[in-house]
Amino acid sequence: MSENCHIEAMGKAVGELSVAFATLSDKGTTETAPLSFCELDTLHPLSGTAALVDFIQNPPFEIKREGVARVRQLLNELKERHTELERLPRQIVHHDLLIFNLLTRSDGTMSGVLDFDFASRDIRAIELAVCLNHLLQFHPGLLEPVRIFMKVFSAEMRLNADEMKQLPFLMNIYYVALLTIYVGQHASGKDVQHAFTYIFGATDSNVQLASRSQ
């Protein structure tokens, strides 16, 4: 995803899909399994908030101490923000709108979206939080790709002021949700050390950059 046209196409596709999901949610025409990135106990049968806390307190491999402290801080903040988050608009969310799940034509436009396995009702702004984190994974430290994406996305889907206020926190809590899933995967025998190392370095730096684009 190195060209601006691809970023624009992604922003348009994400915005259009969010609008379409809102229609489905309003009509109640779809049923999905409960899954919310702000409700960590819904994310993996072998993991949850307690399992994540135990894992970072007694890790099977070396992880940064400051990363552990940051995760615990975010977990506390998640409790403190519960009422505010409950007030945010909710609808069906894809949860996995990564570039790998978007089909691209030769002219750079998007032709389709894949992998709806994690689609479920959640906070609407989570979709944008996921996409911005993913965008910054490909363009670390760069502000312009975020601005391009947001301009096109906002032309399709407008989030309200409360959602935009919570967006930086949702970008961070997305990573906490991923860590919760990885703890479950570790319990099932998968190697998650590399994923933990990346996530501990990605929180906050991505958020600060995205916040500057607003």
Image (tube, rainbow, N blue to C red):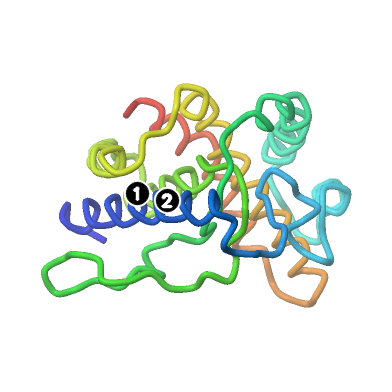
Q: Which mark is residue 5?
A: none
Counting from the top left corner in percent of width and height, residue 37 is at 65, 49
Q: Residue at x 77, y 56 (%)?
A: 42
Q: Nearer the viewer, residue 30 or 140?
A: 30
Q: Residue at x 37, y 64 (%)?
A: 99
Q: Quadrant of residue 47?
A: bottom right
Q: Which mark is residue 18?
A: 2
Q: Quadrant of residue 107?
A: bottom left
Element marked by disc 2? helix
Q: Would residue 150 be found to the left or right of residue 49 on screen? A: left
Q: Compared to 9, does 161 lie above or below?
A: above
Name the image quarter holding the N terminus. Answer: bottom left
Name the residue at the left extreme: 107
Name the image quarter holding the C terminus. Answer: top left
Counting from the top left corner in percent of width and height, residue 183 is at 76, 61
Q: Nearer the viewer, residue 137 or 31?
A: 31
Counting from the top left corner in percent of width and height, residue 152 is at 24, 43
Q: Residue at x 29, y 50 (%)?
A: 11
Disc 2 residue type (three-letter):
Ser
Counting from the top left corner in percent of width and height, residue 128 is at 44, 44
Q: Which mark is residue 15?
A: 1
